[in-house]
Image: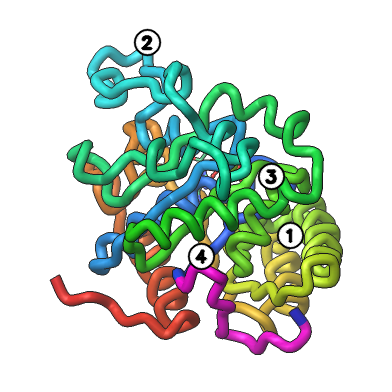
Amino acid sequence: MSDVPRGWAVTPSTGVPTVAFGNQKGGTGKTTATINSAGALATRGHDVLAIDLDPQADMTKGLGLGPGDDADPSNPKNDLPNLLVTDDSNLLDVLVDNPRTHDTALSEILVEADEYDHLNFDLVPSHKDMGLARDWMDDANARLSLKQALEVLIDDGHEYDFVLVDCPPDLSVLTDAAFIAAQNVFLAAQTQATSRDALDDLWDQLESIETNQGIDIAIVGLLANMYRSDGQSRKFLEAFDDSWASMAPVFRLPMRVAIQRAWDNGMDVFQWEDANDQTVERELFSEVAATLERAFERTEVEA
Ligand SMILES: Nc1ncnc2c1ncn2[C@@H]1O[C@H](COP(=O)(O)OP(=O)(O)O)[C@@H](O)[C@H]1O
Ligand SMILES: [Mg+2]
């Protein structure tokens, strides 16, 4: 990390800009940031692949491809399949099999945006079997599994401008696999002491991965999420700025009803329209997308 300057990013072995959204603390906005950054990049004309690496499958559910909503018969999620319980091959097969020699490739499990009206980007969904990942992925090779699977996907001719990976809320082998595949990390944190402490541990983890794998990892952004305009939030924003702003831009997102409403209806905020104003979150995630374009030297694609 030390020799990767601010505003720059690392191009991974696939050649495709790839970003892992991480923080071992849950509920900080990783999944929200992944879905909406993917939506923003897609709205700006990019082909995007989003990968749900979290066994809790919040991104898959948040995009409507998990269980429906019994409490709300009109919810659009109810018309969509639940991909978390399919008997077909799933992400665990891809990660546990050696992707260079084995049968299950990412291309077999990915859901293309064209398949569903509400999807702005392609998705590799999670699956209920991913709960076993930590038991099965226990060797050094497992840490390379996502990187290798993505290399095979891109070698096979799938073309993407960006790949975004939603990490689980931990520093497990799955998260390591995401950091190694992406080599670029976007942090999502809340303006609280526990978030600041979690980021310190994450920093140590990134440094140890860099040393063990002999790779550079860039921090491409930090989302200071659900911040309030009180003294406590301001104090932690200053701490984030002191620690991280020299490496990466810090984006501030307040509590927003539209974020939750879009999520509840299985969409990113660029797809979801309702009476709640979406301007703040659309502008913020467009700015995240523009920052990623600059970091990877990609430009917005004219429609
Ligand atoms: N800025 C925000 N305003 C309102 N709700 C938010 C905001 N950010 C996240 N949420 C909600 O908080 C919950 C946790 O966010 P999530 O992105 O799942 O966190 P993580 O992936 O880090 O566990 C979700 O229900 C999400 O819709
Ligand atoms: Mg999440």
Task: State left or right for residue 108 relative to residue 186.
Answer: left
Q: Earlier in the sequence, mark 4 or mark 2?
A: 4
* Amino acid carrying mark 1 in the image: Gln
**Disc 4 to disc 1, how far (Cα)?**
33 Å
Instruction: Name the residue tied to disc 3.
Output: 174
Name the quadrant containing residue 43: bottom left
The kind of residue tagged 3 is Leu
- Earlier sequence position, callout 2 versus callout 1: 2
SS class, disc 2: loop
Give the distance between the C-alpha atoms of the residues marked 3 and 4, in whole angstroms: 16 Å
Name the residue tied to disc 2.
Answer: 70
Q: CA distance from mark 3 to mark 2?
A: 31 Å
Above or below, comparing residue 168 to residue 206 in the picture: above
Question: x, y (%) of residue 140?
Answer: 80, 50
Report the span colored magenta.
2-15
Name the residue beneath numbered marker 4: 18
**For this view, does 193 lie left or right of residue 88?**
right
Q: Nearer the viewer, residue 232 or 7?
A: 7
